[in-house]
Image: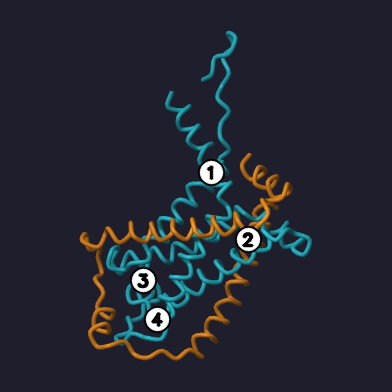
Chain colours: A cyan, B orange
Amino acid sequence: MKIESGLVEPVRPLHWRLKITFWLDVLLALSICSLQTVSATGLVIHEWLGLTVVGMVFAHLLFSWSWISSTSRRLLSQSTRAHINYIINVALFCSVIATIFSGVIISQKAVPVLTGSKAVLIMNWRWDRLHNDFAGAVLMLSGFHIAINWEWILAASQKILRWIFEASQ
Amino acid sequence: MRLMRVFLRLGGLSLAAGVVIILTWIYGGMRQYPLPDLQEREARQNRPPWPDAGESLTILGDGVELILYAVIGRTILRLRLSPSSRSERELIRLNMR
């Protein structure tokens, strides 16, 4: 509660959409980092978390739909920055899907449970290598994605921190 | 109506993902990689199913790598490109309300 000139004003509630988007993005960044090394999470968590990332990415894209639709419609008349942002986002989407798809092909724990099939005894080395390459691309493009959206991240972090600080008082 | 719109968008995203999967399948079929050596094959075939506490620090290393890419991206984008346009900034604000 904020008290000004004798009047009691409620602290303006932070929009739920910003809160969800912000924490979803934090969760996505943490998931992408922890998915890079299988031995750190173990194969079971690695595969299930990898499948969960698909849902998180789709949710992230649904929350960013206004940007996607407006930029797609006026792509030619946009600035160089917007073009590069768009290319990075498309490449990131393709890399994530390719990583998940190659991960599904070489899956030993999650997909056999979901499909009720037996895990493959011999690893498909080609898809294993591709999975690694795509995962590396996801990490790199995520870094670029963070870089180009830095202003948003900074502004959202400030709002969220201010809200946490005000709510705790 | 709103739910319908969400489903339509999800359908569009799934369609785009489907196209990417087909392209990945074609690309994967074309690539040829040499077999990894026996030791590496053994290690990759028998990965630990559960977390290894000794390896947990590597997540931090991957976090640092992500930050490093962000810093590189930030440096390049700051030096070479114009700042975000007014309409882009408006969109950022709109999403934050």
- The answer for which chain carries disc 2 is A
* Residue situated in front as seen by the camera: A31 or A49: A31
Q: Most extreme residue toward the front, as rendered?
A: B79
Residue A110 is tagged as 3
Mark before the other along the chain sequence, 4 or 1? 4
Please tell me how crowded label 4 is: few (under 14), some (14-19), or many (20+) other residues with Cα within 10 Å.
Answer: some
Residue A129 is tagged as 4
> How far apart, in angstroms, are the residues tagged by discs 2 and 1?
17 Å
Residue A85 is tagged as 2
Q: Inspect the image, locate mark 3, and give the three-letter code of the amino acid beneath it.
A: Ala
> How far apart, in angstroms, are the residues tagged by discs 4 and 1?
36 Å
Query: Which SS class for mark 3?
Result: helix
Q: Inspect the image, locate mark 1, and give the three-letter code of the amino acid beneath it.
A: Leu
- Taking the spot 59% from the left edge, 63% from the top edge, the residue there is A89
> How far apart, in angstroms, are the residues tagged by discs 4 and 3?
19 Å
- Taking the spot 66% from the left edge, 51% from the top edge, the residue there is B83
> How far apart, in angstroms, are the residues tagged by discs 1 and 3?
36 Å
Mark before the other along the chain sequence, 3 or 2? 2
Q: Inspect the image, locate mark 4, and give the three-letter code of the amino acid beneath it.
A: Arg
> How far apart, in angstroms, are the residues tagged by discs 4 and 2?
28 Å
- The answer for which chain carries disc 1 is A
Q: Position of residue A110 (x, y in %)?
A: 36, 71
So how many labels did they put on this image?
A: 4
The answer to which quarter of the image holds residue A59 is: bottom right
| Circles 1 and 3 in contact, beta carbons < 8 Å | no
Q: Which residue is mark 1?
A: A154
Of circles 1 and 3, the one toward us is 1
Residue B14 vs residue B39: left or right? right
